[in-house]
Amino acid sequence: MQPNDFPRMMEIYQQALDSKNATFQTQLPNWNDWNKNHLKSPRLVYQKTGNALGWCALSPTSSRYCYRGVAEVSIYIDSNAQGMGIGSQLMCQLVEKAKAQGVWTLQSAIFPENTASVKMHEKTGFRLVGYRERIGQLAGLWRDSWLYELRF
């Protein structure tokens, strides 16, 4: 992933925001904010014939030293490319690169209605470790989230 990938990444992320089923976020971040809130590596973009169809990156879950190897996954696939296995391919690469950098736990908070994300996480070895009822509001509605985890 390079800074010049960011505009296309945000087009894909906007699709996720519009779906209201992938994130509590409601506005796109600028490059500086996004960059400072994500680990420098791994950051991956899936491209086919020069067109980015998906991306993934990690965020630290805490600034405390004891949690330095725990990261939260962000993974988004263009709505026109979903169901083609791109998410699983990206996730497998992300897992391998994260392991090599000393990460020991990946986690994802997923809306239960996002069945494609649930299936992709389970397919790549994540397990459901908990759920949070009415954890936040999105568009005036209380939403639950499921917490998935992959430990190495």
Image (tube, helix red, strand yellow):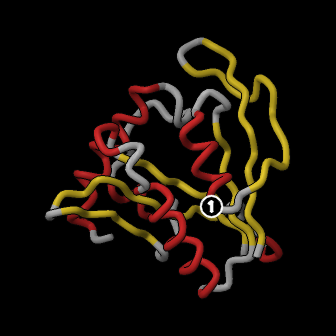
Q: In the visual, does 7 lie left or right of 45?
A: left
Quadrant of image for the C terminus: bottom right
Q: What is the crowding at mark 1: few (fewer than 14 residues within 10 Å), some, or many (at least 20)?
A: some
In the foreground, 48 or 42: 48
Residue 21: x %, y % from top left: 53, 29
Q: Which residue is depicted at the point 75% across and 45% down? A: 147
Residue sitting farthest toward the top: 140
Q: Nearer the viewer, residue 100 or 125?
A: 125
Q: Note whether 17 is above or below 122 in the view shown.
A: above
- Pinpoint residue 56: horizontal percent, then vertical percent: 45, 60
Q: Quadrant of residue 62?
A: bottom right
Check the picture and name the quadrant holding the N terminus: bottom left
State the residue in front, 107 or 82.
82
Q: Is residue 80 above or below residue 148?
A: above
Q: Amino acid under label 1?
A: Thr
Left or right? Give the position of 121 relative to 128. left
Residue 30 image position (x, y, % from top left): 33, 50
78 over 36 or under it: above or below: above
Q: Which residue is mark 1?
A: 124
